[in-house]
Amino acid sequence: MRIAIAALVLLILCASASAQNFSSYKCKINQSLEPGKEGSAQPYTLANPHKEFIVDRASGRMLGGTVSEVWNHQVWDRGSDQQSYKAIYSSIPLIHLGRIVGAGGPPYLNVQLLQIGEYEQGAVKPFLLVDGMKMHMGTCTHLR
């Protein structure tokens, strides 16, 4: 009985370690929505449909996605077999010598929330990216 319990614990630890043994996600947007005037979901057409991006799992930094490199990023939950991966992104205009750099008008704050269904079985994980008033959905895979 002790051997069976020890083997089960070892199996769980190995499975958890292998599930966490990757450094990034590669994600592809499959569908985008935005609210219509009456509040119902309406298709949102991206300039580049099926856009791909990469997310560094440790830092949350997004490359090729809908955020700029100067945006702040923070991982709130690295995900597990019971939780989704969660990262938040915010744009805070750069101020240099009292002037807003890279903005054509007053400073605006943009916020995005990314959740990746790390708890889902298999190599393909669904994601939801809330980008202001738009929602992007698709799938992510692990990159080593």
Image: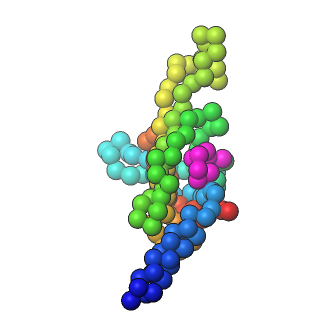
As drawn, the residue found furthest toward the bottom would be: 1
Residue drawn at the location 49% of the way across and 43% of the way down: 88
In the picture provided, is 11 more to the left or to the right than 61? left
Q: Which residues are magenta?
A: 56-63
As drawn, the residue found furthest toward the top would be: 98
Residue drawn at the location 45% of the way across and 67% of the way down: 81
Residue 27 x %, y %: 60, 58
Decide which of 85, 101 is in the foreground and name it: 85
Residue 10 x %, y %: 50, 77
Residue drawn at the location 41% of the way across and 65% of the way down: 82
Quarter of the image with the N terminus in it: bottom left
Res 50 seen here: no
Res 144 seen here: yes
Residue drawn at the location 58% of the way across and 35% of the way down: 71
Residue 18 x %, y %: 58, 70
Report the colour scheme.
rainbow
Decide which of 34, 126 is in the foreground and name it: 126
Name the main secondary structure of what is drawn in magenta: loop
Picture mark count: 0
Does the magenta run of residues contain 59? yes
Decide which of 124, 49 is in the foreground and name it: 124
Does the magenta run of residues contain 119? no
In the picture provided, is 113 more to the left or to the right than 64? left
Q: Is residue 53 above or below residue 21?
A: above
Residue 123 x %, y %: 57, 71
Quarter of the image with the C terminus in it: bottom right
Q: Is residue 53 above or below residue 108?
A: below
